Amino acid sequence: MASKLQKRKSSSGQKTSKRGKNRPTLTVGEEEEPTNMESLGHPEIYPVVLTTKTQEIFNCRIDEDITDEQPYKLIKKEDILADFQNRAAVSDFYPVKKVIQEYPGDEILLVYDKDFKYGLNFYLVGTEEGKENYLNAPEIPEEQEEYKEHIPEEICIYKAPISKPWVSLGSEKEIEEESVKESTKKITYMISRKRHQFGAPIKFSDQNASSVKDAYIECTAYPDKNFTLRQLEKDIGMQVVPEVKDISTQTRWTYPKNAITQYHPREFSEEEKETLGQAKSLTDFLNNVSISVEIALQQNEIMNTFIDDWKCLAEEEGTFGDKTDTHLKEYQSFTDLHNLTEKMITCVSWHPVIYGLIAVSVAVRLSFEDRVHFSGKLLLQPSLILFWSFSDPIHPQLMLESPDDIFCFKFCPSDPNIIAGGCINGQIVMWDITAHADRIENIKTGGSRSKKVTLKPMFLLEPDSNKEAMYIRHCAVSSIENGHKHVITDIHWLPDTFEINRMGTVFENRSGICCQLVTCSADCTICFWDIRPQKALTPQPTEKKKEESIEIPFDVPSTFLHLDLAWKPLSKIRLSKGETSLDHCPTKISLSEDHLQYKAQDKMLAQSKAAKVGDMNPYQNLEGGLANHLKPREDFCTKFFVGTEEGEVIYTDWKMERDSETGRLMTKQQFIAVADYYGTLHILEIPWTLSHPSANEVLSMNYYFEREVKHLEYVDQRKKIREQEKKEMQLEMEKKKAKTYQKSKEQLEAELKMDYESYLELERSILVNLGLIKVSEKVSYMEMM
């Protein structure tokens, strides 16, 4: 009876033993070849698996019919053959059907394999000889039985497994279906911080409790139907485990609420009132606190200490409107519909002349890593400065194009049509919108020509006249090799009253207009720029000019053509941190008010010069004033404030000095002059740590001085106490001496006699304790004495 086994990994058609092993399934019409333990030296033993149902049929239930004392059962061969007819292949004895049919006896021995020695829970003995050997085992002497415990019953012969080719029965498909695969797309988050913030101390701040109701914000969960998923199929696996319960208790925390409780006052009785009224402690207390109470009452009469000045600000009776007028309200918003990409506003500036016109610079909202990654796409998107008018909140009036995103820009004080901006790549861009001035302003003139003009605000114009947006190209851009290496964070025009040279020396402005700029960048430098040619140009013949003329696009003014891609900074300042190798990172520049204000006569002189020029734009002839002689300005403060990325405010100087050792131009040195006894004057340089106070230096010094003062006061108090103690000790010594001299002779003899008697009493008690004398002898001894 040759039969073949088909092994499957699915759970259908399998029977599970107590140890959870899978039993192979037979095809219809095939029989399983009986498996014996011939490899272990017992060819008569055939392991079988008996289920609970089979154990009940043949009365061989474990722990009931079969026990540890009698682990076997004799089953009739006829009963097993009858089970074959009833249950056929479902019978648990079916794998050993051939052995049972060929068995010569009437009863077959069935043994319970408690320790699973042969792999299953029961085994049959297939021969009569084996049954007799098991039932009638020879007796073993006690000596051999003790020795038998140390001898293995059988020797297992190892047989190396033989490799066979894999036969697929479809189990890999079931494994693939049951395997878990990721279906959702992974989300990547990048969290970065600036280098200067590494190791920085954390600062906590208080929360304004009045801004939030009950100072508590709760984000409660709620079901969202848009993200509700319907479960169509669910695989559940079950396993019998001991029942485990996890129980915890926690008090429920609720948001805090303000509560108040009122009690009835406690009143003293009449007797207690009289006692307290006559008490000295109450009188002393009232005398001590009466002065402070009177002062507090006077202060309450002078001013109301509980009034909120901020709430009363701009809410007097003389103001117009109600209390809601004191809050800021949104008047209008502007949105560019042409550029729908995610952009942020980096700088905002009102037009200095036209009321109601505002300019903003926009940049792509990306980190530095993302800018590098999407650098190719960013080149296709325009970088703009938008001019908005109140008359049209959707269509910009002008759009200034830039080679890269602008992070700061400023209108020229001398001519608002001249605009300078700083890019993210460190370049400075110049625009001249003089040709488009009529588009953004409307000048009303009377019947006669007048010098005074009336400007009509842009929000009063008709919106139909400004529907088409105008793109304006830049006139010039600075050299990227010689300028800043990082984003420009701030830019300012120097006033038209002075100009500086490469060393930072201040002179009177020869051109009479704003022609110099100052910028700061994240590369830890501050640069000064001059929009005029570096050298005065000599007049050339008209024919030669025509030959050397460069073709300029019709829409680009030639105002700053001499600066394009060749503009270099006039001077550069690096903000170093003293003796360290680190530098400050400037973010904002603040010039002194003296730089922005100038004398009235200087202003009149500049206006007279402009009147002589007439209607000609002074920026069209920038090299004209370079031939004038430079006049230095005395007593001019060259210091200014710089705000850094770390939150520090630096007061530095733009005037440069050349280092004698390195030859570099350097600014912030501080010296101290010290003269010695031998007539030598020493100049000492003050280091950074001694010229700049630390964060808590003032508090530390105040605490040091207070501690020293308290120490001196303590020393003085101890000196006074010591002197007082010395005086008291001297007085006691003098009193003792006076008492000694005052005693008479009789008193001294009486004291000596008492001391002698006490000595004799001590001597007698010692002798009695030692047993040298008896009590009776003690009495006689006392009488003798």
Image (tube, grey):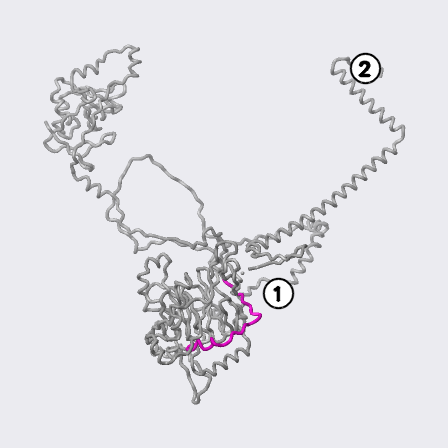
Calculate the distance from the C-alpha at mark 2 to the C-alpha at mark 1.
97 Å
The one nearer the camera, 216 or 188, is 188
Residue of label 1: 303
Q: Residue 530, relative to residue 710: is it above or below?
A: below
| Residue beneath the point at 17% across and 23% down | 36
Reply above or below: 397 against 36.
Answer: below
Q: Which of 145 and 252 is in front in this view?
A: 145
Numbered badge on residue 779: 2
Identify the residue shown where x is 44% and y is 78%: 618
> Is there CB contact under 8 Å for labels 2 and 1?
no
User: Residue 17's spot in the image, x, y percent?
Assistant: 23, 30
Q: Quadrant of the C terminus?
A: top right
Q: Is residue 636 magenta?
A: yes
State the SS at label 1: loop
Name the spot of residue 724 as percent of width and height, x first.
Answer: 77, 43
Residue 695 sits inside the magenta stretch: no
Instruction: Report x, y in % for residue 746.
Output: 89, 28
| Residue 332 shows in this picture | no
**Numbered marks: total:** 2
Residue 623 seen from this side = yes
Viewer-side residue, 624 vs 679: 679
Residue range highlighted in magenta? 619-642
Question: What's under tag 2, amino acid-wise?
Answer: Val
Badge 1, how many Cα within 10 Å: few under 14, some, many 20+? Answer: few
Asked which secondary structure carries label 2, the reply is helix
Residue 23 is labelled as: none
- Given the image, on which type of amino acid does mark 1 rest? Met
Does residue 12 appear left or right of residue 426 in this picture? Answer: left
Decide if residue 689 is on the left or right side of residue 64: right
